[in-house]
Image (cartoon, rainbow, N blue to C red):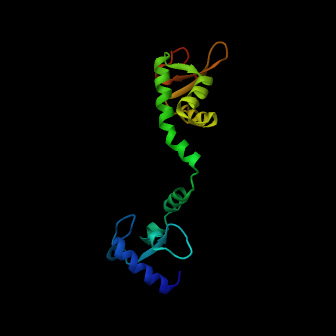
Amino acid sequence: MNKRQRLYYYGIIVERDGEFCWLCMKTKDDVGILEIHETAYTKPLDSANMRLLCHGCNHSPDLRKQIILSQRDHSPEHQKNIEAEPYYEDWLYGELMLNNWNMSLTDAINNGAYNVGISQITAKRYLGKLTAKDAPYQIHPSQFGIMYVWLKSKMPHDLDKDY
């Protein structure tokens, strides 16, 4: 963006948002200079994709990560999977509650996928998060080698060992 464009868009942004950093809310008097930050790069330039930021916020590594995440294009399938995760967790808790706090891993994946309306691969991914070290569930084998999902707080003490 050249100097003429910067002056033009700066005026539009100030009129729309005010003259302060969009993230830390410091004014121009507090920081000296406010920089134009483009949230999306478009041709032609579009002021709707621009915000004023102080130098510190504009060059923060956290801002770069936030921008990358917000600009990811979610396909309809991916968006559905993001929205379905809490429903899967609720379904799993309800099923475990009804079945003495455990169920077979196969049922947790297949029935969960069917009841929540997601793929089996997505159900496995959700279950992977829910059975992480600090998560509330654990996968544990039975004496016959069948894998079961347990709510950690309800596991019998003789099973509550890491193998």
Residue 159, horizontal then vertical, whole percent: 56, 17
Location of the C terminus (image quadrant): top right
Answer whether residue 28 is visible to the viewer in this image.
yes
Residue 81 point in image, percent of width and height:
55, 42
The x and y percentages for residue 15 are 34, 76
Tally of marks: 0
Residue occupying the point 60% across, 28% down: 109
Please, is residue 51 above or below residue 73 in the view? below
Residue in the image at 48% along x and 34% along y = 87
Q: Residue furthest bottom?
A: 4
In the rendered view, tell whether residue 22 sits above or below residue 77. Answer: below
Describe residue 17's horizontal placement relative to residue 103 as left or right. left
Name the residue nearer the viewer: 117 or 82. 117
Question: Which residue is drawn at the image coordinates 49% and 59% (left, top)?
Answer: 62
Give the vertical position of 8 relative to 77 (above or below): below
| Front residue of 41 and 161 | 41
Indicate the quadrant where residue 124 lies.
top right
Residue 143, quarter of the rendered image: top right
- The quadrant holding residue 146 is top right
Residue ID at (51%, 33%):
88
Direction right: furthest residue? 145
Examine the rendering and report whether any part of residue 160 can be seen.
Answer: no
| Image coords of residue 84 (percent x, y) | 51, 39
